[in-house]
Image: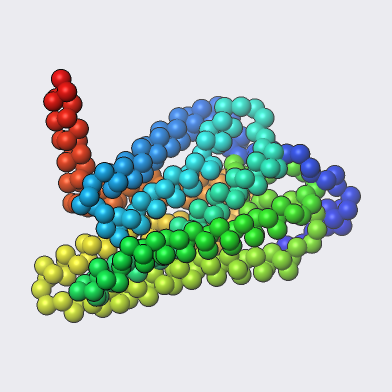
Amino acid sequence: MTYSQSNLSGNQTISDLFILVGFSYLNKLQILLFLVLLVIYLVTLMGNLLVILLIKLNPSLQTPMYFFLVNLSFLETCFTTSVIPQLLVHLLVEEKTISIVGCAAQMYVFTIMGLTECCLLAAMAYDRYVAICHPLHYTTIMSGQVCVLLAGASWVIGISVEVAQITWLFSLPFCGSNRIHHFFCDVPPVMQKACVNISKNEIMAFIVTTAFIMSPFLLIILSYIFIISTILKLPSVEGRSKAFSTCSSHLMVVTLFYGLALITYLGIKSSSNPESNQIISLLNITVPPLFNPLIYTLRNKEVKGAFRKTVVDTIFSQNQRN
């Protein structure tokens, strides 16, 4: 990143707020986008909260895989909530402003949840590796203490890395125009507002972030190399099919999450067409949290069975009261 001399010294320092240009170019169509996003957000909340509730209420789902799924659903809820409610407000108002403090708070939550999810997906891949490659030792290896340690490590990495990065970013002075051509406070557009030359720091931040994002991804790939190798060695087609079905949901979630994330942050972006970049970012924020609960419920007999049991028990208890 390079900075002109005027940007380094002559422009007015930004000290109060940013203007998020967002989807202003849609004009009256912003109302339609508001309605679509409102429905998506409500469905996302209900889906993830329902998954958490089902797992907590059903003893049959108190296993390592569903323990991680509770964490994943909580992460997805916080991830989308850090951005979508404010976007919904901005779609209805003329002045799409956010204070610098609010911008920092949004970025803290968004980035922490994103990196923690990367690490948690790696922990879930390890769980599937143990379940398929070492089934006889699964309960011993994946004890409650190990599950808590893996989930805790995911949170510690996400919080420590992103708190350090975002605190550093907001310690810089911002100057020039306070207009951000995005619908939320993402790292790249906010970093461009810094009025000091941060080329070396930016490269270092990119390397660190990429390392912490891609390391879990490489661990996931390694886990699935062993998983697929083990599945292919099973003697029966039925056995291979059953083994693959136990990890297919996680594989779909990983593909969806990392696919959109890599397109959003490492893909080819057009500086002359920020609108298309915003659409890609919007898909990254809305699609995984929306579809992950569906993937784990529609493809999972245990969750569907727990849902039916919960509904039947609720109806039965209600009839007894009447």
Residue 84 in sight in this render: yes
Question: In front here: 139 or 70?
Answer: 139
Q: Is residue 76 above or below residue 216?
A: above
Residue 70 located left or right of residue 17: left
Q: Nearer the viewer, residue 92 or 171?
A: 171
In the rendered view, would you say 171 is above or below 207?
above
Q: Residue furthest right?
A: 10
Residue 46: where, in percent of width, then height? 36, 37
Asked whether the viewer can see residue 249, the reply is no
In the rendered image, which quarter is residue 132 located in? bottom left
Q: Quadrant of the N terminus?
A: bottom right
Q: Is residue 288 left or right of residue 133?
A: right
- Of the 4 image quadrants, the one containing the C terminus is top left
Q: Give the residue at x 17% y 30%.
A: 317
Query: Does 14 sit above or below residue 261?
Result: above
> Is 21 displayed left or right of 138 in the figure?
right
Nearer to me, 86 or 266:
86
On the image, the x and y values in percent for residue 277 come to 56, 50
Residue 15: percent from the left, percent from the top? Answer: 79, 42
Residue shown at 65% from the left, 55% from the top:
166
Q: What's the residue at 68%, 50% (across, down)?
A: 190
